[in-house]
Image: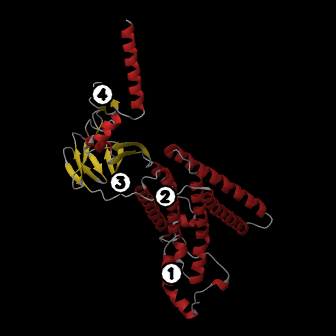
Amino acid sequence: MGQADADRDADVRRADAMTEHASAGGALAAPDGEGAVPTHAERAASDPSTSKRRATRALLEVIDRDGHVRQVWPIHAWPARIGRALDNDVVLTDPHVAPHHFSLDLDDDGKLTLATGDTINGVSVGLQRHPAGSRSVIAHNAAAIDFGAGRSRLRLRLADAPLSPELPLAGVAVHNLRILPSLAIGLVLLAGIAFNSYLDSDPDTFSRVAGNTLLAGLSGAAIWCGAWALLSKTITRQSHFGWHLRVFMLAGLTLLALAAIPGLLAFSLSWPWLTDFSFVATYAVGATALYFHLLAVEPARPRLLRAVVATGAVVGIALTLWFNLQRTSRIGEELYMSHLFPPKLRLARPLATDRFISELAPLRALLDKKAKEAPSAEELGAPPPAGRGEDDDE
């Protein structure tokens, strides 16, 4: 018994020594003296198939609606199978993805091929849709390739794809560069509002009118920008309040300029059409401001946002032209130019008296024709005929 216990203790010490040697990175000695037993790390390093699979050939990223990466799968070998089944290389939990939705492969010539599996939704690459059972070559000249499978947005980055340069962090200096222009724009906007209040009010009531106008402007800016910031926070999880405030101030400053510059140019150059159609520029400014507000809410679809705001601006301009035509029989907004400035600002040459009278000749014929027409009851101010209101109600 004593000899057996001694032999067992010797075996335990030998096993402990071998374990410590292996944990230190060494090789285990074979018990029969045939040579060292390689460790798991040494076997993995010496196996060419294992090292080949461990090399990252590509990255497949899941992109959310804001364009941010939410999940990444490294691809170590081709082909890479993507689907909802657990035996895929990339497993998606989207219920609109088939069990074996599609696979990607890179041949010896470096061509990326897409093989669509048994799916009813297919796979989209950019604007092109690949139905079930199709096999096609995908061009990969860009830094990344965007795929669509079900409701999942995927982005493939190959190992040899070019990388974009590193973006700098927004430090204190950059933050100050954003604050100072915004503060300057805000001060200029407040000064413009105060100046308009001075022109539109009497000296005795200027302070009260200016205070009410500034208070209304600040309250409107806070409510407007706060609503957009809340919408941005709800959708993108970032408020972007500073962005919305800058858009609001730039739009307000531009509208103040549009309220004065077209009238001044029309008076100086004798171009009345500038004030007739100044609403076109107003619609353009409003559509531009709306686009930049929406861009903070939906940054991943700038092309769609541009199309939406452009369509809205065109529809608004068309409706305004139609309303002007119905109201005044002219598509312009003003019947006459009502902006008067100091004569020194007049750059256009004055018309000679004879030319001025000759250009009024067509107007005289139109007025004579209008004078011969019998005035309507509405123009005379007479009440409508009896029973007309009842007929209209019926």
CB atoms at circles 3 and 1 under 8 Å apart?
Answer: no
Distance in Å between CA atoms under marks 4 and 3: 50 Å
Q: Give, as a three-letter code, the residue at label 2.
A: Tyr
Is the residue marked by circle 4 packed among few (<14), some (14-19), or many (20+) residues within 10 Å?
Answer: few
Residue at the top extreme of this rendering? 1
| Residue 219, percent from left and from top | 66, 52
Give the residue drawn at x 28%, y 31%: 35
| Quarter of the rendering containing residue 10 | top left
Distance in Å between CA atoms under marks 3 and 1: 73 Å
- Residue that mark 2 sits on: 291
Distance in Å between CA atoms under marks 2 and 1: 50 Å
Labels 3 and 1: the sequence-earlier one: 3
Mark identifier at residue 368: 1
The nearer-to-camera label among 1 and 4 is 4
CB atoms at circles 2 and 1 under 8 Å apart?
Answer: no
Q: Secondary structure at mark 1?
A: helix
The nearer-to-camera label among 4 and 2 is 4
- Residue that mark 4 sits on: 30
Is the residue marked by circle 1 packed among few (<14), some (14-19), or many (20+) residues within 10 Å?
Answer: few
Q: Give, as a three-letter code, the residue at label 1.
A: Asp
Q: Secondary structure at mark 3?
A: loop
The nearer-to-camera label among 4 and 3 is 4
